[in-house]
Amino acid sequence: MSLEYESFVKHVLSGQEGIFFSVKNEVVGHKVYYGWGKKSAADFDQGPFPIFSITDFKGNKNLAWNFESFETASIEASDIEIEILEHYKSPLGEIDLGASAFETQTSFVSKIEALQTQARAGEFWVANFTQALGGSLPPEADAHLLALKTFYEFLKLGKNHCGGVVITKEQIFCSLSPEIFLVQNENRLQTFPIKGTGTEEALRFSEKEIAELHMITDLMRNDLGQICDKVWLERERYLTKEQNFYHARSEVNGTLPDSVLKQSQYKKLLPAGSISGAPKARVLSLLKDVESFDRNFYTGTFGVRLSPEKSIFNILIRTLFLDPTEQNWQFPVGAGITIESDPSAEWSETLQKAEVLKDCLKPKLLP
């Protein structure tokens, strides 16, 4: 936990809007960026900077804001406790992930089998099929507190991440994302696609998992090639331990023609290959027909632009979306589907990915 998050929580609980963005990994270390108070609409290209930016799945809708108060810091973990969050009991503490799924296991498996029929016909190589977990919140539930509490407990887990909390009139969500989409330092871009979640042994030796990441890595190289003069693979398929499971990742780098990343260039990278599939256009058409919910901002991007020359964005996966008007919650999850996929195993993988939410919401024994 950090003093920065404690400060952010105090501002939000005083009734102010605010956004907290946190990234922790071996490339960037642990950095936080947060703003609060009066906000104004901002432009991706023109600012005023710094801005927080949220883009939907297909890159068609962008929300960007500048806050009157903004802080950034490189931090180390501490033992700070936020009393109101320590004693707040989440209304989702006893969540049953399987029962909360919009799909049944039977319908989920059936849809994957239908996709695999398309794959065998040569329609696609890999598709990221997603489903949503969700439900109603009790009338008395406070969406602000729930979002703040969830990310508070997540930070205490010490996981590598690229996520945060958005509490504005337009959006309330808490992103526990493990995936950095894009890091921009002047003309250098880095992207870190994830494809593969499971045991170390399964990820090291599964032909399906290996092929899946290779395909998506090639797709990301091609995407960066649309806007960069030079693209190269910095690291090819490395595993990172995420407490009780592993992720398989790659790192792709590119060099922009100049030091400014423009919105027109950024949109060419969307939707991100790791959460769509390949080939993109055909996969998007197929997913539209089989997914049981509108992704909207899920699998879009969320990040901070300190200037036109320096930005960092995540992929909005493992994200708890809250709607205080309708008093409901949604936590979508997905899996990469290929011809070799075991549909029942993919169902289990989606629920495994959602376990991080349970880790942040399960009741704690208080003194």
Image (spheres, rainbow, N blue to C red):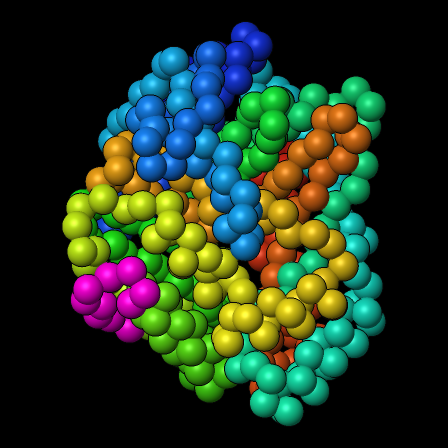
In the rendered image, residue 268, in percent from the top left (x then y), is placed at 40, 58
In the rendered image, residue 185, in percent from the top left (x then y), is placed at 20, 45
- Determine if residue 136 is in view: yes
Quarter of the image with the C terminus is: top right
x 79%, y 20%: residue? 140
Judging depth in this view, the residue of 82 and 180 nearest the camera is 180
Residue 346 is left or right of residue 230, and the answer is right
In the rendered image, residue 364, in percent from the top left (x then y), is placed at 62, 32
- The image quarter in which residue 193 lies: bottom left
Q: Is residue 235 magenta?
A: yes
Quarter of the image with the N terminus is: top left
Q: Is residue 300 magenta?
A: no
x 56%, y 23%: residue? 168
Location of residue 245 with respect to 106 vertically, above or below: above
Location of residue 34 with respect to 97 vertically, above or below: above
Q: What is the magenta range?
A: 225-236
x 58%, y 57%: residue? 353
Judging depth in this view, the residue of 241 and 251 nearest the camera is 251
- The image quarter in which residue 226 lies: bottom left
Residue 320 is left or right of residue 228, and the answer is right
x 46%, y 41%: residue? 302
Q: Residue furthest bottom?
A: 121
In the rendered image, residue 365, in percent from the top left (x then y), is placed at 63, 29
Residue 242 is left or right of residue 353, and the answer is left
